[in-house]
Structure formats: structure tokens, C-alpha cells
Amino acid sequence: MRHAQLLAFHAVATQGGFSRAAEKLSLTQPAVSDHVRKLEETYGVQLFNRAARGAELTALGRGLFAITERLLEAEGQARELLSRAKTLDEGQLTIGADAAVHVLLHIVRFHQNHPRITLRLVTGNSAELLARLESLSIDLAVTAERPSSEAVLARRLKQDRLVAVIREESTFQKERSLSLTRLAELPLILREEGSATRRLLLEELRRRGLRPSIAIEIESREAAREAVAQGLGVAVMSEGELVPDSRLRTIRISDWQASMEEWLLCLKSRADLHIIRSFFDVLPG
């Protein structure tokens, strides 16, 4: 059974004859007749009583017609759904970000262009987000690291230096910078395993033979900022992800000029999806 045969059958049934069905389908009458004939021959049935005045459905034909009515209705619904998705009048885009601040402006621009798309923003560290991207649980990821995988397409969003974050009312409030050696002596507030900031800091301390004094490990940058404000220690963060807080201030690390990049990632296999490509299109430059 072919789809074209069912279409021909349905057209003859609705139009009441082969000539009118051929006109509706923009086919020749012999082509329509051949489709219906082959359908009948394949199953050894008669679907129409043919007469000079036209074609009338047999009892079996009426049963098949009820099915093709539902089939073509569902086909029309599918076509409408896909058309809305193509024009971004419907759909959902899920974005994972290691910090919402890095992607919110782009989300606003996308929403202004495509207000009917449902947007969902989830958070996590770089390692977690890459795993979720690969498992297709998110469509896009914003991470501090560009993966080496050839399966991932990456676009750099920004680059910010790493700074020390201290409590405003601390013994360092008058200092403009700290050395990495001095920083290692202070109680450090570290992010969890998988954090790119944590990895960069610990690798540099290890390279210099410095052993950090770790006060606490915390799973989110928001909690890390609060821990600093409460006087638990000093944190190292990307300058671009800090929000104004009168309880905190930043200090430059004098002998370590490290920076943190933020990348927008998607799977190359999904880069041509209209909704994903349209998000990349709102990025500047």
C-alpha cells in the first residue's frame, strides 16, 4: 500500500468520480485510476462501484474512507505543526549555562525576535552541562571551557579576567592586589569538581608548588559569593559573572593574569535545526 494510492482513493471518494479526483490532485485520469486499481488488486477487493454517472463507495470502501479521513486530518495537523516550528511560531529551546549572566542578554534578544518559543534555562558547571548537551537533555550550553570534541560546535561569547573576591570589611580592604602565594595562604572558598575556575586555580597553584588552604567547597557561584560575604574566606571568580554587592569587593591577582572564556555550544549534528541556528543568529558579530 502506497500513500499515493490512498490519496487517489480518498480523492475519488470525496469528488465522486475519477475525472474530478484527477483535477483535484493535478494528475491525469489514467494515473488516478491506476492508483485505485492497484490498491484493489493488491488486496483482492472492490472499493468502488463504477458507473457512467460516477463512482460509488462499496461497504468496504466506506470503511476505508473513514480511515483515510482520519489519516489525512492527522497529516494536515502534522504539516501545520511543522510549519509553525519552521517559522518559530511554536517550540521549546532549553539552554544550560554555568552562569545565567553570560547568556541572559542573548536570551532577551531571541525572545524579542521569537516570542512564541518557550525558553527554559538550567544551570550547572561546565562538565555537567557538556554531559547534558551530549545526552540531548539541553539544546545549547554556555560553559567556561571549549570542549575538544569534534562533535561540538563552539562560539566564543566573552572573555573576563579572574579576580579574588573578598569581604568588604576584611583586613585586605585597602589592598589593591594580592599575589598568588598570599592567596594560597588564605582560607579559600572553592567550587565543586567540574568547575573550570576551580581547575584553573588549582592547576596554577600546583604548578608553582603552592598548597592551598581550603576553607570550604561549594556547589554554586551564588553560594560561594554568599560564603565570602559571611566571612568564610576568599573566592576566585570571573569578573564578568559578579553582580553588584556592597558586602564584597574584588582584588586583582598581581602575578597571575588568567582569564575565563565563555562559549556557546551545540552539537554539530543539530546545528542546522532552525531553532538552534536562530539563537546563534542573535549573537553580535
Image: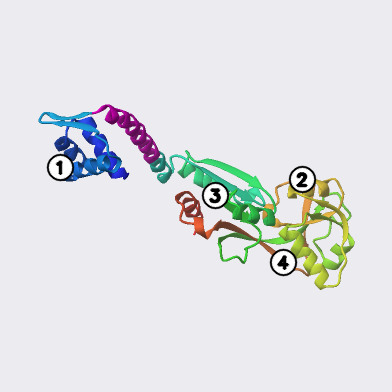
Residue 152 or residue 205, whichever sits in front: 152
N-term mark: 2 or 3: 3
Which residue: 23% across, 31% down?
Answer: 13
What's under tag 1, amino acid-wise? Gln
Q: Quadrant of residue 87?
A: top left
N-term mark: 4 or 3: 3
Region of the chain picked out in magenta, as a range: 58-80
Mark 3 lies on a secondary structure that is: helix
Mark 2 lies on a secondary structure that is: loop
Q: Which residue is mark 4?
A: 258
Q: Magenta stretch: residue 197 in it?
A: no
Q: Is residue 274 found left or right of 124 in the rendered image?
A: left
The chief SS type of the magenta part is: helix
What's under tag 2, amino acid-wise? Ser
Marks 4/3 in contact by CB < 8 Å: the verdict is no
Q: Is residue 76 found left or right of 162 in the rendered image?
A: left
Q: Magenta stretch: residue 76 in it?
A: yes
Tell me if residue 143 comes above or below residue 116 in the rendering.
below
Q: Which residue is mark 3?
A: 106
Near mark 2 (Cα within 10 A), the count class, few <14, some 14-19 or many ≥20, is few
Q: Which residue is mark 1?
A: 29
What's under tag 4, amino acid-wise? Ala
Mark 1 lies on a secondary structure that is: helix
Determine the CA span between mark 4 and mark 1: 75 Å
Tag nearer the camera, 4 or 2: 4
Determine the CA span between mark 2 and mark 3: 27 Å
N-term mark: 1 or 2: 1
